[in-house]
Image (cartoon, rainbow, N blue to C red):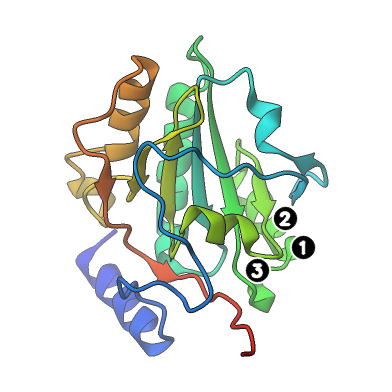
């Protein structure tokens, strides 16, 4: 991503109140810690019209969950990196899964629009709809994209950004990849958290 494109994205996010602010949405996410058991989820409908659950992945040593969406410019810019990550790890004998989950509630995030996006980009990984936002809230996800790496015991070993740079050509540290490699050794990565960069998930407010 060029610097000009980056500045345009920042401007768009600020204009629409989307840029990550570092605060949790009211009545929204909890705050998980490294080592916590990953919240389970079930029957999330995907762009393949199938229902998906975390328990479907018992044959996977490591599960990477990414909360993302269609319309956040940051999420869009990270799609190619996610596809690259999937292709890099898909043949590993240990079994590594990448699951994309959309908890946003705008019209641009409807399942039919998710299907269009998944088809246009030929997503090789499941893209699921969290219509109630309960899954995203249970993980404490605030931004898109935001990643969580789960080890074989389904405990969280990393959460935050995919890597250390918004611009793909400047990336030096690939936090999620390093976390996956550590999890396969039943270890914690050197970096267990790194702030996610992106757009805020617009959680529904409840009346008091």
Identified at 72% across, 55% down, the residue is 115
Q: Which mark is residue 109?
A: 3
Q: Which mark is residue 112?
A: 1
Along the line of sight, the residue nearer the viewer: 21 or 12: 21
3D distance between C-alphas at marks 3 and 2: 10 Å
Along the line of sight, the residue nearer the viewer: 81 or 17: 17
Identified at 48% across, 14% down, the residue is 92
Q: Which mark is residue 115?
A: 2
Q: Position of residue 204 (x, y in %)?
A: 61, 79
Q: Nearer the viewer, mark 3 or mark 2?
A: 3
Q: Position of residue 1 (x, y in %)?
A: 29, 58
For mark 1, give the secondary structure: helix
Q: Which mark is residue 140?
A: none
Above or below, 55 relative to 115? above
**Left or right side of 172 for 38:** right
Above or below, 119 relative to 1? above
**Left or right side of 197 for 86:** right
3D distance between C-alphas at marks 2 and 1: 5 Å
Above or below, 114 relative to 161? below
Q: Position of residue 199 (x, y in %)?
A: 41, 70
Mark closer to the chain start, 3 or 2: 3
**Left or right side of 50 for 189:** left
Query: Label 2: few (<14), some or many (≥20) within 10 Å?
Result: many
Question: Can you say which quadrant of the picture contains the C terminus?
Answer: bottom right
Picture quadrant of residue 112: bottom right
Along the line of sight, the residue nearer the viewer: 151 or 82: 151
For mark 3, give the secondary structure: helix
The answer to whether the residues at label 2 and label 1 have Cβ atoms under 8 Å apart is yes
**Left or right side of 203 for 145:** left
């Amino acid at each position: 991503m060029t610097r000009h494109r980056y500045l345009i994205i920042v401007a768009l996010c600020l204009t629409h109140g989307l840029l990550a602010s570092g605060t949790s949405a009211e009545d929204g996410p909890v705050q998980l810690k490294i080592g916590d058991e990953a919240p389970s989820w079930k029957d999330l409908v995907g762009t393949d019209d199938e229902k998906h659950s975390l328990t479907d992945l018992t044959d996977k040593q490591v599960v990477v969950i990414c909360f993302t969406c269609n319309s956040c410019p940051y999420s869009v810019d990270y799609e190619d990196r996610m596809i690259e990550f999937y292709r890099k790890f898909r043949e590993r004998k240990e079994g590594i899964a990448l699951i994309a989950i959309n908890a946003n509630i705008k019209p641009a995030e409807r399942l039919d629009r998710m299907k269009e996006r998944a088809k246009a980009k030929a997503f090789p990984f499941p893209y699921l709809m969290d219509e109630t936002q309960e899954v995203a809230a249970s993980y404490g996800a605030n931004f898109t994209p935001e990643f969580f790496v789960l080890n074989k015991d389904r405990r969280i070993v990393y959460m935050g950004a995919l890597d250390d740079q918004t611009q793909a050509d400047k990336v030096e540290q690939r936090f999620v990849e390093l976390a996956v490699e550590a999890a396969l050794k039943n270890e914690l990565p050197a970096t267990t958290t790194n702030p996610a960069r992106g757009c805020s998930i617009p959680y529904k407010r409840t009346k008091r």
